[in-house]
Structures are given as structure tokens and as C-alpha cells.
Amino acid sequence: MQDTKRSIVAWAFYDWANSAFATTVMAGFFPVFFSAYWAVGSSAAEGTFYLGLANSIGSAIIAILAPFLGSIADWGSYKKRLLAFFALLGAVMTASLSLLQMGNWPMAVVIYLFAMVGFAGGNTFYDALLPYVASEEKVDFVSSLGYSLGYIGGGLLFAVNVFMFLNPEWFSIVSQEQAVKLSFVMVGIWWAVFSLPILLFVKEEKSRDALPLSQAIRKGMSVTINTVKSFRSLRTISFFLVAYWLYIDGVDTIIVMAVAYGTSLGFPSESLIVALLITQFVAFPSALLYAFFAKKVGVRRALQVAIGAYTFIAILGFFMNKPLHFYLLAVAIGLFQGGIQALSRSYYTRLIPKGRSAEFFGFFNMLGKFASILGPLLMGLVSLVTGSTRLGIVSLIILFSGGFFMLSKVDETKGAEEMAAFLAQE
């Protein structure tokens, strides 16, 4: 356990690094640019469907790979090396989006898929390092610090990119199109450069039984398969993962589809970008404040409050009809987004064995990615079939309700007993 200020800040700075992709690319410019430039000529419903399909396929790839890669990293002590690989993949693919020309939506989907794999794969090993840098007493705060730095870091670069987009002449840029493409390059550079602190200053504790890569692959795959078979006895973790899958499905869908939804309602792109900036800067302090709220009421109760808030947000989203409503919704999302993400991650560390953190965070991120398959695809299909994206956002209420119910069945004490029995059998 490092638990030092330098290692904690270095770890948290990876959120600062990769959140530029989440804001400028995933939530911001990619949906707008995809519909208006790469998928030009398609209807709003078709554009929403294509974007949902891209998010779903990328999520499926990492969902399948994450548990196996996590287990390999545990048995061979490869967490940092795999983090570096996926971060570089994501950064290079993001910058490569700048090379695509108008109408080339198939290649935009392919490159975006690889960028998403880099983003999600890197997060698996980033999350797996959390138990090594923070004690149980600090883990909620440290997890929240990561998300908080992510919001402010991603928000700062996004703000610069927005100014480039709205006023390209200020930066000697010839057009908004060039401003967006240059933004993709800037995100790639930002991601690569600010990934260095975690790679340089966070020490990965080497297992005494660390295996060479070939043996780690065989061991990791066999252990992962055994763990999957044992989830029936690990009921507490199973309840939490199902709960997480359901409620984070709704959260992630709102994150990645919000701009596309606003576009389908006819809101100007400038208003949508401003709303995303509002969310980022509201979420920056809110993520830290929500950690203190959780300390007062308990982490599980705080998660349930956030799920309830998102249910209300989905209902309000159905009735939006002007940009002002989108701004107010952006504030509401910012108040709870960092809290529900950070506390989900830190709560999960309490349920898993430290020495198997990458493997179990592989399952955690796998469920998160499977959620990202269902949500965007569901919203896209409902939009395509009914011709109304409003009905798509209403469907998220079911996911939040199911997540709330499953989370209420989680018992930490019972979970510790189940995990101890599981480890004793291996």
C-alpha cells in the first residue's frame, strides 16, 4: 500500500488525461461531427442509430476481453504495461479521426471503436491500481478525486476546443471543420502526455508468484473461467454487478447520447456544447462533495440517492423543448454524475480481494461496457422504430429502477464471508 500524496495525485491524474476523450470526443464533438459531416445526408434517427451502433460494438469488444486481460495482469503483474498500451492505442486512434473526409462514416466508426477500446481497456487497469494507492479509509475520497480531476481537466481542454469551434478565426483556423479535427489531435496528445504520471510515480506491487507472460495468459484464462463458474456462490458481488450494470447503463447512455438527443430535438450545436461544459464544471466540485455526503449517510445509500436523481433526470429529459431546459438538465447531471461513478468504483473495492483487483475490475468494466451496449442500442432502436428520440430516453427509467432494487440486496458483511470461502477453495 503506497497511500502517499504523490502516488494518489499521480493515479488520479490519469482521469485528467483520458477524460479529454470522454468530453471532447465521446460526449462533445464526435456525435455532432458524425451526424453533420461523416454521416451527412442521413436522417436524425439514422444518425442516432449509427452512433448507438458504434458505441455498442466498441463496448462489446472490451467487455469480452476485460476479465481475461485483468486476470493476466494480476498473475503476471502487467497492470501498468497494459494501461500504457491501451492509453497509447486510444490516443493514436483519437488523433487519427482528424484524417477522415466528409461522408466516410464507416471508417469513422472503425477508428472510433478502436479509440473506445483504448479508453475502456485503460480504465480497467487504472481502476485496478486504486486498491494499491489508497487505504480503505481514503478510497472513496481518492476515487472521487480522480473523477473530479477528470472533470476539470477534460473540461478545460473541452473549453479551449469549444472556443476554437465557435471562433476559429481567433486561433488562425480557417473553418469549424478544421477546428474539430484539430481538437481530435489535441485530445490524443493530451491523453498521451498526462498518462505519464501514473506510469512514472505509481508503483505496481509485484506478486511473489508473478508469472512470465505465456504462463500468465494460461493461468489468467483458467482462473477467470473458474471465477465465472463461482459467481453463483459469490451472491453479494453478483447482486452489486447486476445493479451496477443496470444503473450505469442509464448513466452512460445519457453521457454518450446526450448531444445526439439534443440534436434530434433541433437544439443548436452551440447550446449543446455549452451544456456539456456546464456539466463538467458543476461535476468538478460535486464529485468531491458527494464523497463527504457518502461518509455521512453511507456509500450504498448515497448511490441510491444518485440513482433516484437520474430517474428524475430521465423523466425531465422527455419534456425538454428549449435549450434552457438542456442547461438545467446539465446542472442536474453534473451534481450526481461524478458521485455515482466514483462511489461505484470505491464501493466495489470493498467487495473484492486486493490481489485479484485487475481480474475483478475486469468484470466490473465488462458489465459497464455491456451496459453501454444495451443503453445506446435501445435508445437508437426505439428512436429508429418510433421516429421519436423522446421515447428512447424514457426507457432508461426501467434500468435505474432495476439498479436501485438490486443494490438494496447487497450486504457487505455477507459478501466478505462469501469471498473468504471462495478464496479458501482455490
Image (spheres, rainbow, N blue to C red):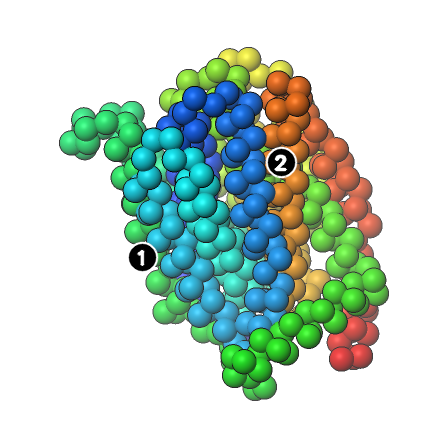
**Rendered residue at 30%/37% (across/down):** 181
SS of the residue under disc 2: helix
Pair 1/2: label in front: 2
Residue found 48% across the figure and 47% down from its top: 113
Where is residue 209? Give x, y as percent: 59, 86
Q: Quadrant of the N terminus?
A: bottom right
Using a 10 Å C-alpha cutoff, classify the residue at mark 2 as few (fewer than 14 neighbours), some (14 to 19) or many (20 or more). many
Q: Position of residue 73 (x, y in %)?
A: 55, 72
Residue in front for this viewpoint, 421 or 332 = 421
Separation (CA) of disc 1 from disc 2:
33 Å
- Residue 381, picture quadrant: top right
1 and 2 marks in contact (CB < 8 Å) = no
Q: Which residue is at the far left?
A: 172
Q: Residue 6 versus residue 188: which sits nearer the camera?
A: 188
Counting the numbered discs, the total is 2
Residue marked by disc 1 = 193
Specify the quadrant that holds the C terminus. Answer: bottom right
- Percent of width and height locating residue 392: 65, 26
Q: Which mark is residue 21?
A: none
Q: Is residue 237 left or right of residue 107?
A: right
Q: Position of residue 92 (x, y in %)?
A: 35, 53
The amino acid marked with disc number 1 is Val
- Where is mark 2, residue-wise? 377
**Label 1: which secondary element:** helix
